[in-house]
Amino acid sequence: DVDEQMSGIQDKNSSYFVEWIPNNIKTAVCDIPPRGLKLSGTFISNSTSIQSLFNRMLEQFTAMYKRKAFLHWYTSEGMDELEFSEAAGNTADLVSEYQQYQEAGVHSDDEYSYHEDDLDADVEADMD
C-alpha cells in the first residue's frame, strides 16, 4: 500500500523527478512503530544532495589511508593495498557523476519552479 502511494506521488509530481534516475525512491515500513503512533516509515530519495556525504566519507578515508591507519587489519585478512586506492577512485568518480547531474539540473531549473512545500503537501494529502 505504501509503495503504491509513493508511486502515485512520483507519477503525480513527475516534473520534480529526473528520468536518468528511474528508481530514486525507496520506502520501508516498520511493524513496530514508536509509542503513540500506528505506523512508522522511512523514505529515502536518491538525489544529488547525497554527494556531500560521499565527499565527506572520501575525505575522511583519504586522511586515514595516508596515515595507513587500520590498514594492517585488512591486509592481514588478504586485502591488497591497491583495493583501497581503487575504492577511493570509485568514490571520487561517484561524487563527480552526482556533481555532473546537479549541474545539469541547475541549467534546467528554469523550466520548473520546484517548491518543496508543494511536494510535502501532496505527500500528506495522499497518505490520508
Image: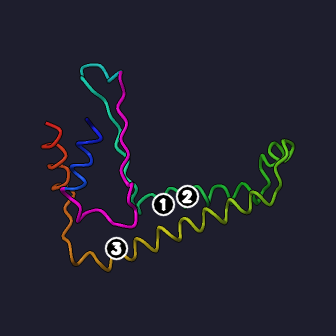
Q: Residue at x 19, y 54 (%)?
A: 119
> Could you tell whether 104 is left or right of 100 in the image?
left
Q: How far is the residue under mark 1 from the one under mark 3?
A: 16 Å
Q: How far is the residue under mark 2 from the one under mark 3?
A: 22 Å
Q: Amino acid at mark 2?
A: Arg
Q: Amino acid at mark 1?
A: Ser
How far across and down, in percent of the image, does residue 103 sit? 40, 76
* Residue toward you, 21 or 43: 21
Quarter occupied by the N terminus = top left
> Could you tell whether 114 is left or right of 97 in the image?
left
Where disc 3 sits, the SS reads helix
Reading the image, the residue beneath label 2 is 56
Q: Amino acid at mark 3?
A: Gly
Disc 1 vs disc 2: Cβ atoms closer than 8 Å?
yes
How far across and down, in percent of the image, does residue 72 sit? 84, 46
* Residue toward you, 9 or 50: 9
Reading the image, the residue beneath label 1 is 52
Q: Image quarter for residue 118? A: bottom left
| Residue 13 located within the stretch drawn in magenta | yes
Magenta region: 12-31
Q: Residue at x 38, y 55 (%)?
A: 24
User: How many C-alpha atoms fall within 10 Å of the one at disc 3: few (<14), some, or many (≥20)?
Assistant: few
